[in-house]
Amino acid sequence: MSTAIINTAGINTAGINTAGINTVSASPRLHLTKRGRVVLTGLAALPLVIGAFFVATNGGGATATDEPTSVSFEHVTVQSGQTLWQIAGELAPSADPRDVVADIVHLNQLSGADLQAGQQLAIPTQYSH
């Protein structure tokens, strides 16, 4: 263990050393003029004004209406033993079957690739004829 010793013989508690020199420095007070207060207030308010401008100009982008919308899908009835892969190949032979299967699963909210004979599947509009 080490010990530190501080020599306080030359300094008293008033901040004046024994030689009579003042060791406490005076700190200047900050004084704002009326113009300085106006500038400081303007700089502090600037982000709020910019935010209010963006809210005012971009706030009305979406509007709700009472009119019902009708979306119609083509439906495919699953045949016995038919798979999603086969349906995707028949619907879009030039597209990647993985993408078509993923779109069908997403649209119909299927939990997996298991299908039942007679099941109705909605077909995404980009693959409907």
Image: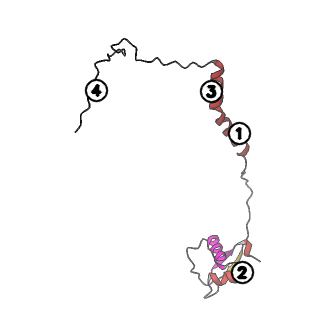
Q: Amino acid at mark 1?
A: Phe
Q: Earlier in the sequence, mark 3 or mark 2?
A: 3
Q: Nearer the viewer, mark 1 or mark 3?
A: 3
Q: Earlier in the sequence, mark 4 or mark 1?
A: 4
Q: Residues within 10 Å of mark 1 (few under 14, many from 20)?
A: few
Q: Residue 109: image x %, image y %?
A: 60, 71
Taking the image as shown, residue 106 lies to the left or right of residue 20, namely: right
User: Which residue is tagged 4?
Assistant: 6
User: Which residue is tagged 1?
Assistant: 53
Quarter of the image where one finds residue 78? bottom right
* Secondary structure category for the residue under label 4: loop
Taking the image as shown, residue 90 lies to the left or right of residue 111, namely: right
How far apart in space, not on screen, are marks 4 and 1 (Cα)?
A: 61 Å
The residue lying furthest to the top in this view is: 20
Quarter of the image where one finds residue 7? top left
Q: Residues within 10 Å of mark 3 (few under 14, many from 20)?
A: few
In the picture shown, does residue 22 fall above or below 129? above
Would you say the residues marked 4 and 1 are in contact, meaning their CB atoms lie under 8 Å apart? no
How far apart in space, not on screen, are marks 3 and 4 (Cα)?
A: 45 Å
Q: Earlier in the sequence, mark 2 or mark 4?
A: 4
How far apart in space, not on screen, are marks 2 and 4 (Cα)?
A: 89 Å
| Quarter of the C terminus within the rendering | bottom right
How far apart in space, not on screen, are marks 3 and 2 (Cα)?
A: 66 Å
User: Which residue is tagged 3?
Assistant: 40
Give the residue displayed 73% in from the left and 43% down from the top: 57
Q: Amino acid at mark 3?
A: Leu
Does the stretch in magenta take in 113? Answer: yes
User: Which residue is tagged 2?
Assistant: 91
